[in-house]
Amino acid sequence: MSPPGRKKDSQPACGALLPFGLVLAAAILLAACSEDSGRDGQRPTSPPPELDDGVLRIASDIPYPPFESYAEGSNTLTGIDADLAKALAKQLGVEVQFVDLDADERIPALEEGRVDVIMSAMTITEARRQLINFIPYFKGGTGILVPGGNPTGIRVDYHLCLHTVAVQEGTLQLDQLEALNTDLCAGEVNIRIKTFAQHAQAVAQLRAGGADAVLADYPLALNEVRLSDGGLEVIDFQILPVTYGIGVRKGSGDLKAALTDALATLMKDGRYEDILYRWGARAGIWKEVVS
C-alpha cells in the first residue's frame, strides 16, 4: 500500500526479478531507482544508529508533574512527557527507557551519548540551541488558575482587572501582574494583588474564596488542577508562552528526522492531542504539525 498522500510509483519496482541475461539492465534500473529515491526527499529508511538496540533512552527530571511523575503506589512513569515519549517509541517500534537526571546533568549526558534524547519540559533557548538541537512540541508560559467552572468568567489577562489575584512573592508572575496594573488595568480598574511567601499559600487563598485567580507557571498550575479533583481549572489563555522541545544531540540527524516524522504522525492522527487533553493541557498544544 502506498503511504498516505503519495501516488503509487508507475516505474518498475526496484529489485524486481529479471530474466537471466538482463543483469546490465537490472543494474541500470537499480541505479535509476536509487537516484529517484534521493530526488524525492524521502527520509532514511534504515533505523537511526541510536535505536539499533531497540531502545530509546530519554533523560528526564523526575518527578516534575504533570510532565513526568510516578503513578501513586507504583513505579509506572506517567505525565505529558512520559505518555508522549511512550507514543513516539511505539510509533518507532522501539522500547522506551527513562533516565532520571537533574537539570544540569541532562545536556552533558546527551552530548556524551549516555541518553538519546531529552524530554523534560525543557524550554528552547538560544543558549541551549548552541549545544543541542530541538523538536518543538509544547507551549507553556504563565497559567491563570481559577475555581472549577470559572465563576468570574476570566478568559484572558486583561479580564483580571478589578479582580483579586493571589501570587507568590518574587516571581515573574508578580512582575506580570504589576505590569498589567500600569497598562491594561491601570487606575480605577487595578488588579487587587495578594502576595504570599509560597505558591501553596496563594492556592489555598483561591480555594478559600479569598482570591479570584492565581498566576503561576503553566505546568505548576496544571498540576494544581490535577490534584484538585475538579475544584480548580486553568483557562486556555497563557501569558507569554514559550516553546518546549525534545532535545536531540547535534550529529543525530537521522534520529531527529525519525522523531520528527513520528511526532508529525501523532499530531495528524490525534494521538498527540489526546495526550494533552488527558492532562488538561490543551492550552499547551503546539499548533504547527512538524515536518
Image (cartoon, rainbow, N blue to C red):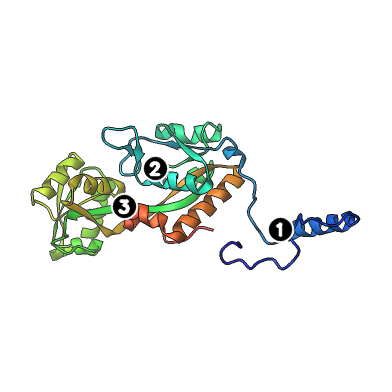
Q: Amino acid at mark 2?
A: Ala
Q: Nearer the viewer, residue 220 or 100?
A: 100
Q: Position of residue 42 (x, y in %)?
A: 65, 57
Q: Nearer the viewer, residue 218 or 51?
A: 51
First of labels 2, 1 by sequence position: 1
Corner quadrant of residue 186: bottom left
The disc at residue 82 is: 2
Residue at the spot x=91%, y=55% of the render?
21
Can you say whether 131 is above or below 16 in the image?
above
Q: Amino acid at mark 3?
A: Arg
Q: Nearer the viewer, residue 154 or 288?
A: 288
Question: What quarter of the picture does the C terminus occupy?
Answer: bottom right
Residue placed furthest toward the right: 21
Can you say whether 71 is above or below 36 in the image?
above
**Marks 2/1: CA distance?**
35 Å
Q: Which residue bears the numbered disc 1?
A: 37
